[in-house]
Amino acid sequence: MDFQLNEQQRIIKDSVRKFLAKEIAPLVGEHETQRKLIDKSIVKKLEPYGFASGLVPEEQGGLGLDFVSYCLMVEELSRVWASLRTMVTSSALAVRLLSRVGSRHQREKFLPHLMSMDQLACFALTEPNVGSDTRSIEAKAERDGDHYVINGTKTLITGGSLADLVLVYAKVKESGEDKGITAFLVHKDESAFEARDIRKMGMHASPLSELSFVDCRVPAANRLGAEGEGQRIALSGLNAGRVNVTFAVVGLGQAALEASIRYAQEREQFGKPIAGFQLVQDMIVQMALKVDTARLLGFRAAALIDQGRQCRREASFAKLYATEAMVEVCNQAIQVHGGYGYTEEFPVERYFRDVRHLTLAEGTTEIQKLLLGREILGASAFV
């Protein structure tokens, strides 16, 4: 396997990095320290680089980028601003799913506004009583003529209060019969629902929301796929989602590593830079090793996705290792900075808070281990 980037990938990586340094990095401090939520004018700045349209085929109006290229963009964005990354890529993966599964009518109706980043999308799968066991979804949808009526609550939804289009999963009930989990495209302009933001540990500039659907009427034409296909649709995007998270945490780990190298070279104790201390060198070498290992695992899984090959094991390996390892990297970055690492004077305390969330997203660490156990041993720990 060739781990060298091709010319187009190098150009994408370099151009995105330069743009983010100039246009986005100056906005981070104020938004994060004041818990000021990102607005759509900031999101819109990313549109020319394909953060929404990159994974959509050219024949549907997208850029048709390979998945490795998109992952390079994810890493660069996360390296600069994790809050912006989480909103943008959550929307982009919903867009990718719509482009692959949606009907022609649905693509024509929703994709142009989403690819231009004038509108955002989000996933609404998790519920107050339902996390990893998606089969136990409690939200209900009942057919009423040309509409479905949805009732239920979704929680921990990234970008939920800012999203225009919500991909909602609910169990369809018809004449008392359970038709199974079904996916719906719920647009706030035609189907009213309520959103409440939840305060959280990290990523202070992005909303994490609870969405309430009370007799929410959704056009039947907005059903994504057939009744009962919701679980299959949701699972079809999991590998891409897990690789996306891998590069998101690698971006944070890279930022923490770079900050630690700078600090170690500038900070002097006992008459010399602490970069010359053996234990500091050990910490930074271990950080660099973990970042490189996580990135390589991510590249392997992303390359398999580009080849259209099955990569459940590789995607879970990448997500499991990268998220846990980057928590360690960001923790060590605080240690390198000493007491200053615990203050807001340096960004490493934010990196630590931001990275912690991603051990939970797209399947927790424990779920990844159970999935991998099933892949390796052929025996399921799930009921």
Image (cartoon, rainbow, N blue to C red):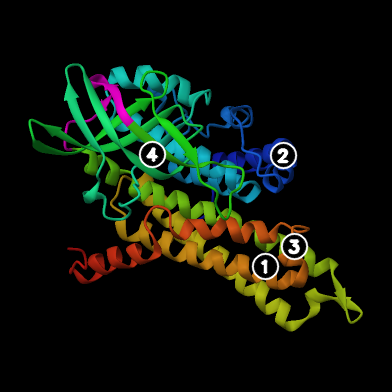
Residue bearing mark 2? 27
Return the residue found at the far front: 214
How far separated are the C-alphas under marks 3 and 2? 19 Å
Q: Which residue is mark 1?
A: 333
The span from disc 4 to disc 2 (Cα, nearest Å) is 26 Å
Q: What is the C-alpha distance between the residues marked 3 and 1? A: 12 Å
Residue 278 sits inside the magenta stretch: no
Element on which disc 4 rests = strand
Q: Amino acid at mark 4?
A: Phe
Q: Position of residue 239 (x, y in %)?
A: 35, 50
Task: Tell me the element at label 3.
Answer: loop
Q: Which residue is mark 4?
A: 123
Q: Secondary structure at mark 2?
A: helix
Disc 4 residue crowd, few under 14, some 14–19, many 20+, Cα 10 Å: many
The magenta-colored residue range is: 214-228
Mark 1 burial class by Cα count in 10 Å: few <14, some 14-19, many 20+: many
Task: Identify the residue under disc 3.
Answer: 343
**Element assignment for label 1:** helix
Q: Is residue 270 left or right of residue 277?
A: right
Q: Which numbered mark, 4 or 3, is in the foreground of this view?
A: 3
Residue 78: x and y, percent?
Answer: 59, 48
Q: How many discs appear?
A: 4
Give x and y (percent) for residue 355.
55, 58
Looking at the image, can residue 379 be seen? yes
**74 to 119, vertically: above or below:** below
Label whose residue precedes the other's in the sequence (4 or 1): 4
Name the residue type under label 3: Thr
Which residue is rendered at x = 30% and y = 66% of the image? 372
